[in-house]
Image (tube, grey):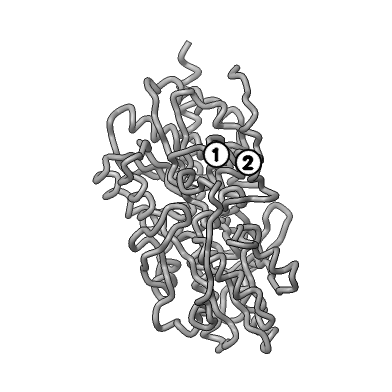
């Protein structure tokens, strides 16, 4: 139920009083509601749940996490 | 796909597994709250690769599983009416009620439609003014803002033939109930990442302190899950107990404030019964009185419904992490995903369904 999938915002428009977007999930396109991510703009990646963008993906934070994991790997490799 | 592939990298998975192995000195019991995480652990085979000292127990984070039987029976009663188009997330259709499920209603001529987004239910109401459209508004905090928006849209567009059958539940009161139970074995929690995308995790530091239990906000991909486990094991080994976030790319401390505002506008805190567990005080959301006109329980007469659980099902103990699915005598026999006795065998988040789908009833030799 709480499944959330990241997708890329490729178009933003108004519909039924709501800010909506066309989202690209790696080649599959869907309409989602941006009411809860008012700061979203075209090109952003958002986490999508039941047709709503619930969070914008933080590129900087994502890079940081991957860097820390890489350091774990490098540390492991140093142990003989 | 960006933000997915890099979190499924086998090399990163291996180094995280090695790291956990290198720091662990004793047996630890860690609960992943969210059923989506239970499925991800089993789907990727991570449970079999972890050091034997890590015992995962599976939490109640499966809305389909904890929606009380009475509410399923109410849904079935409403959906059976000839003037109703009943709309629901797909997962709910196979959940067993006392006598049948929503697929059974459909087989007998009832109109039951699956929607991807609750806004579709509002559109169906607009397109069918002669019918009553009811949406089954279930879910945890992740789903509540979407369901709230359906109600707000119906009000804004003055749609009178739309109502919601609400069964919303919240995670923190359930965590507290698990920790208070006498039989509790859980020593650390992986908190549900997408619930925290909405709510943030400001509710967890007091919980971590009060019960001296590490709480780690965790994502859903293999690298995320192991990163969350590593953080939990590090805390346990060092005797610390704090709330920390290992899902920074999607979760902020304060959460999504505009989504929280919509929840507060439409819903208020209520006591809620959890299937298999019982009533947990202030553990759910119900419609505020200002939105009572959209309450399906007030719109339809639902008084003469008698609910009865299967006597074979041990869903309550499963959902509290007290027993594992393979300890149930009915597992894979009387109870299968095709013919479930209890809700945990139904959903894409139920622990029993995960054990059945990924064949954990077959014993593998550890290599």
Judging by the rendered image, the residue that carries numbered circle 2 is: B5
Q: Nearer the viewer, mark 2 or mark 1?
A: 1
- Labels 2 and 1: the sequence-earlier one: 2
Q: Residue at x 57, y 87 (%)?
A: B157
Q: Are marks 2 and 1 on the same chain?
A: yes
User: Which class describes the residues within 10 Å of circle 1: few (<14), some (14-19), or many (20+)?
Assistant: some
Q: Is residue B94 left or right of residue B27?
A: right
x, y percent for residue B77: 60, 73
Q: Dot 2 falls on which chain?
A: B
For residue B363, what is the image quadrant? Answer: top right
- The answer to which of B344 and A27 lies nearer the viewer is B344
Judging by the rendered image, the residue that carries numbered circle 1 is: B328
- The answer to which of B201 and B268 lies nearer the viewer is B268
For residue B111, what is the image quadrant? Answer: bottom right
x, y percent for residue A76: 48, 20
Q: Residue at x 39, y 41 (%)?
A: B189
Where B126 sits versus B112, above or below?
Answer: below
Q: Is residue B327 visible to the viewer in this orientation of the structure?
A: yes
């Amino acid at each position: 139920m709480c499944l959330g999938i990241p997708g890329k915002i490729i178009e933003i428009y108004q519909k039924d009083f709501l800010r909506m977007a066309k989202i690209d999930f790696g080649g599959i396109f869907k309409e989602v509601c941006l009411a809860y991510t008012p700061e979203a703009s075209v090109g952003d990646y958002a986490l999508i749940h039941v047709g709503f963008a619930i969070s914008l993906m933080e590129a900087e934070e994502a890079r940081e996490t991957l860097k820390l994991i890489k350091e774990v790997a490098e540390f492991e490799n140093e142990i003989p | 796909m960006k933000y997915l592939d890099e979190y499924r990298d086998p090399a990163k998975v291996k180094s995280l597994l090695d790291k956990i192995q290198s720091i662990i000195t004793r047996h630890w019991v860690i609960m992943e709250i969210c059923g989506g995480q239970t499925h991800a652990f089993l789907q990727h085979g991570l449970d079999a690769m972890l050091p034997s000292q890590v015992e995962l127990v599976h939490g109640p984070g499966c809305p389909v599983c904890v929606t009380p039987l009475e509410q399923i029976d109410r849904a079935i009663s409403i959906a059976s009416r000839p003037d109703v188009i009943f709309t629901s997330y797909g997962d709910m259709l196979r959940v067993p009620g006392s006598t049948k499920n929503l697929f059974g209603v459909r087989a007998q001529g009832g109109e039951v439609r699956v929607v991807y987004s609750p806004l579709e239910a509002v559109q169906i109401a607009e397109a069918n003014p002669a019918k009553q459209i009811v949406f089954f508004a279930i879910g945890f905090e992740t789903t509540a803002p979407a369901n709230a928006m359906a109600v707000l849209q119906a009000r804004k567009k003055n749609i009178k033939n739309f109502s919601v059958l609400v069964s919303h539940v919240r995670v923190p009161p359930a965590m507290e109930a698990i920790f208070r139970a006498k039989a509790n074995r859980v020593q650390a929690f992986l908190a549900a990442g997408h619930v925290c995308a909405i709510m943030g995790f400001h509710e967890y530091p007091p919980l971590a302190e009060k019960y001296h239990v590490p709480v780690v906000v965790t994502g859903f991909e293999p690298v995320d899950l192991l990163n969350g486990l590593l953080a939990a094991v590090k805390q346990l080994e060092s005797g610390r107990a704090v709330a920390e976030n290992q899902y920074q790319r999607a979760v902020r401390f304060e959460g999504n404030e505009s989504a929280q505002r919509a929840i507060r506008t439409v819903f208020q805190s209520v006591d809620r019964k959890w299937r298999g567990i019982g009533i947990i005080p202030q553990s759910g959301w119900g419609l505020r009185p200002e939105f009572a006109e959209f309450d399906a329980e007030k719109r339809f007469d639902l008084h003469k419904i008698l609910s009865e659980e299967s006597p074979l099902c041990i869903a309550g103990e499963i959902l509290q992490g007290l027993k594992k699915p393979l300890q149930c005598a009915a597992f894979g026999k009387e109870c299968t995903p095709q013919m479930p006795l209890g809700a945990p065998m139904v959903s894409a988040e139920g622990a029993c369904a995960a054990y059945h789908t990924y064949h954990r009833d077959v014993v593998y030799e550890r290599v």
